[in-house]
Each structure stands twice: as structure tokens, then as C-alpha cells.
Image (cartoon, rainbow, N blue to C red):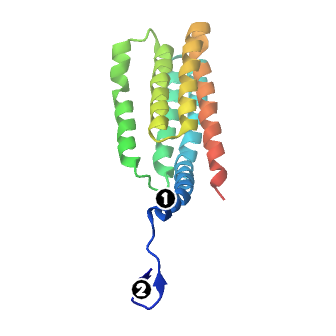
Amino acid sequence: MTINPHGEDFRVPTSADAARILEEITPVTRRSRRLARDVTFARPLLAWGLAWTAGASLFQFVPGVSGAVLGTAVCAAAGAITWLVRPREVRLNTGRRFSLLWLVLFATSPLLVVVAAPANARIMAVFLASVWAVGMLLYGIGVQDLPLATVGLAIVAVAAAARIAAPQLAMLIVGIAGGLGMAALGGWRMRWRS
């Protein structure tokens, strides 16, 4: 026992006490990280999911350049929503670094299109969706977000299967499957909203 200057007895914590305290803190830390992630990404995932679904449908069914322009406009709106609705009160310690990685992925996508040289605009859209889904997969792994990583992996698998089984509908299939997956995950994460 050590005597406290205020006259009270006080015991110095042992390494066993420290280990016990850390074990008690770990689940709280994990839950708070999950809550911050869910609050931060719920609305953007919902917006991107709806944009993928609407954009793919517009691109598939509206003839000519109009479909591509409308599909791109819907995705641009989702990008704006992502920027505007991000909560300012919740900041993740990895936010800036991963935002930069996403920016690099989006900015280099046109270069990847040049390298891959897809045969037409629909194949290009499936290719880009697959590249961005790999981004989701890697981001999910990097921040230990298993549901997002699973959605990314599923989109890549659906894209590969659709390109083989139904190449004319691959963009629509990938857009709807990926969009519904992201929207469902975003909607599920919104359960924290009051």
C-alpha cells in the first residue's frame, strides 16, 4: 500500500489490473468505431446504391448518349450527396488518408479505361464498377469493415458472372445488384439514426 497525500490508502495497479482494464475497454472501442463508421457511411452508401441502380437502368434503357449522360448525372449527384451529408461531428482517424485513396482511384479510372480499352460504353461501365468494387473491398479490409468488403467482393463476382453469362445485360445486372447491395448496407447502417 502507498499512502495518498490526501491521507487515503491507495493501491498501485498491477500488470494484471492493467490487462483486465484493457480487456474491458476493447469491446467499447470496437463498438464505438463501428457506430462512427455506420453513422459516417450510411447515407453515402444509400445514395451511391440508389445512383448505381438508377444510373445503370437509365444507361441500359435510354437510347444513345442521353442514357449515358443521365446515368453519369445520377452518379455525380451521389458524389455531391456524399460530400454534403458527411457528418462533421464524427471524424475517423483514417478519414483523410482513405479519402485521398478514393480520390486517386477515381482520378486514375480513365487511365485504366485507356489501358483496358473496353469494346463499348457498357463494357466500360461494368469494368469501372468492378474497379470501384475492388476499391470497396480493399477499403473494407483496410478499416475492418467486413460488410462493405463483402459488398465489394459480391459486385466483382456478379460483374464477372454477368459478363460471361449475359454480356448485353451485364451493366444492368451489375448496377442493380451492386446498387441494391450498397443501398441495403446504407439503410441497415441508418438504424442508429433517431
Q: Quadrant of the N terminus?
A: bottom left
Q: State the image coordinates of residue 127 (x, y, percent, origin top left).
A: 47, 18
Up/down of 192 relative to 185, above or below: below
CB within 8 Å, label 1 to label 2 = no
Q: If you read the primary sequence from the N terminus, does the residue marked by circle 1 or circle 2 appear first?
A: 2
- Residue 194 is situated, as x and y percent measured from the top left of the image, at 66, 59
Q: Which residue is mark 2?
A: 4
46 or 144: which is nearer to us? 144
- Residue type of the residue flagged with mark 2: Asn
**Horizontally, is 27 left or right of 138 in the view?**
right
Whether residue 62 appears in this view of the structure is no
Say whether residue 21 is visible. yes
Q: Quadrant of residue 186?
A: top right
Tag 1, which secondary structure?
helix
Q: Nearer the viewer, residue 83 or 14?
A: 14
Label 1: how many Cα within 10 Å (few below 14, some 14–19, many 20+): few
- Amino acid under label 1? Ala
Residue in the image at 55% along x and 37% along y: 146
50, 135: nearer the viewer = 135
Give the answer, above or below, for where 190 lies relative to 46. below
Residue at 53 percent across and 29 percent down: it is 152
What residue is at 64 percent from the left and 32 percent from the top?
A: 180
Query: Rounded to the nearest whole Å, what is the CA distance between mark 1 and mark 2?
Result: 24 Å
Image quarter of residue 166: top right
Task: Single out the residue that lies furthest toward the front.
Answer: 1
Helix, strand or loop at disc 2? loop
| Residue for point 43% across, 74% down | 12
User: Taking 50 as reference, is 4 left or right?
Assistant: left
- Which residue is the site of mark 1? 19
Crowd around label 2: few <14 · some 14–19 · many ≥20 (10 Å): few
